[in-house]
Image (cartoon, rainbow, N blue to C red):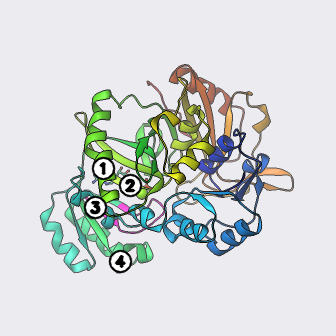
Amino acid sequence: MKILVVGSGAREHAICWKLNQSNKLSKLYCAPGNAGISQIAECVDIKADELDKLVEYSVNNNIDLAVVGPEVPLVAGLVDMLNEKGIKAFGPVKAGAKFEGSKSYSKDFMKKYFIPSAQYEVYTDSKKAIDGLKKFNAPIVVKADGLAAGKGVLICETIKEAEEAIKSIMDNRQFGDAGNTVVIEEFLRGTETSLLCFVDGKRIIPMESARDYKKAYDNDRGLNTGGMGCFSPNPIYTEELKKYIKDNILDRTLNGFLSENINFKGVLFIGLMIENNQAKVLEYNTRFGDPETEVILPRLKSDLVDIMLKCIEGNLSEDDLQWKDDKCVTVVLASGGYPENYEKGKEVKGLNAADSDIIIFHGGTKLSEGKTVTDGGRVLAITSTGSTIEEARTKVYKNISKIHFEKMEFRKDIAVGQ
Ligand SMILES: Nc1ncnc2c1ncn2[C@@H]1O[C@H](COP(=O)(O)OP(=O)(O)OP(=O)(O)O)[C@@H](O)[C@H]1O
Ligand SMILES: [Mg+2]
């Protein structure tokens, strides 16, 4: 099969890496890809949000399966457009991607189907939203409804701060149209974790668990980022918690999909807050997570092409997902200044010095005059498996010491004490 992966991050590199192991693959393409991806796939110079060009390319090159990584093309309906041209695509159609594209839509769905989640109100008018703050106690969570590249959620310690957040999102349009509607939520306490699931329209089947590190610096200090490291499995998933999640979240979500005639196929990423072995849903995303994918796919024994095709055909079963006992750790090497301003174009050195069992997923790199240079905030995800988390972690950090680019930053505490 000829397969096209859409996207350019470490998530897409991990997807390409895993697809590349399938004997069903005849040729792998990635649009636009990056320097690392170009070693295993033909990179196509089309960006992930150039939907018409992606469809045209897929038609002209007889692509058998397109795999859409990022949320922006999913929410814009790329899968629907490909399907209209008779091209199979892995990822939800627009009606499914709305669970990520609109937080108010998701919250209303959760309420309707009794899925445990934070109390909330939805507003389309800033004065009414500010007035509505009366219903909440601080801290208060203010969220832009639409896609805001992971920046649209503001945790406000005081009512005053929440008012400022509403004004900045709705009146000053900090996130553009994404902030035409806001969701105000009760602040939940507990331990945060995410669960990625394959969905085939009729079943929601969880993958192995992972825990990511969102804050920029050690000991969870600094700003929120896209994720600075991750490990799998996550010991928080006790059998008791798994059962709770199945009964109260997965089964009810599926019931909602079926009742609303939403033919969801692809990956459903459920953000959870855990307290006392119970879980509440923080959000749905409708694609693989980054960096979760970088630690989950190296643990997957089964063929990813098979799984994706079964999701599309609607006949995935739990037995289709076989996992290795190995544990996995990834640490992100970021450009100094990320998640705020950072420079690009720094040469990445030492990539060839890494041990052969280390997997280096590229996030923000490109080739320039034959050299690999930085081209984003999260540059590389250095990944290793091991019989224990500690073994994997030690291998990752040992190899990080061989890799260097100017102003490279990374967390030193990923998976410590696990
Ligand atoms: N009700 C809540 N109570 C406490 N913390 C919350 C709440 N809602 C969101 N958060 C915090 O804010 C973060 C971002 O929220 P959310 O996942 O809804 O936004 P997002 O921008 O869509 O994130 P992502 O980029 O992961 O998709 C969460 O990971 C969590 O740390
Ligand atoms: Mg989200």
The residue drawn where x is 24% and y is 52% is 117
The residue drawn where x is 36% and y is 60% is 153
Ligand 2 near label 2 (Cβ, under 8 Å)? Answer: yes
Sequence-first disc among 2 and 3: 3
Q: Amino acid at mark 1?
A: Val
Structural distance between the alpha carbons of marks 3 and 1: 12 Å
- Cβ atoms under marks 4 and 2 closer than 8 Å: no
Sequence-first disc among 4 and 2: 4
How would you rate the neighbour count of disc 3 (Cα within 10 Å): few for under 14, some for 14-19, many for 20 or more?
Answer: some
Q: Amino acid at mark 3?
A: Phe
Does 55 sit above or below residue 296? below
In front: mark 2 or mark 3? 3
Q: Determine the secondary structure under disc 4.
A: loop
Ligand 2 shows up in the quarter that is: bottom left
Q: Amino acid at mark 4?
A: Asn
Kindly identify which numbered label has been placed on residue 180. 4
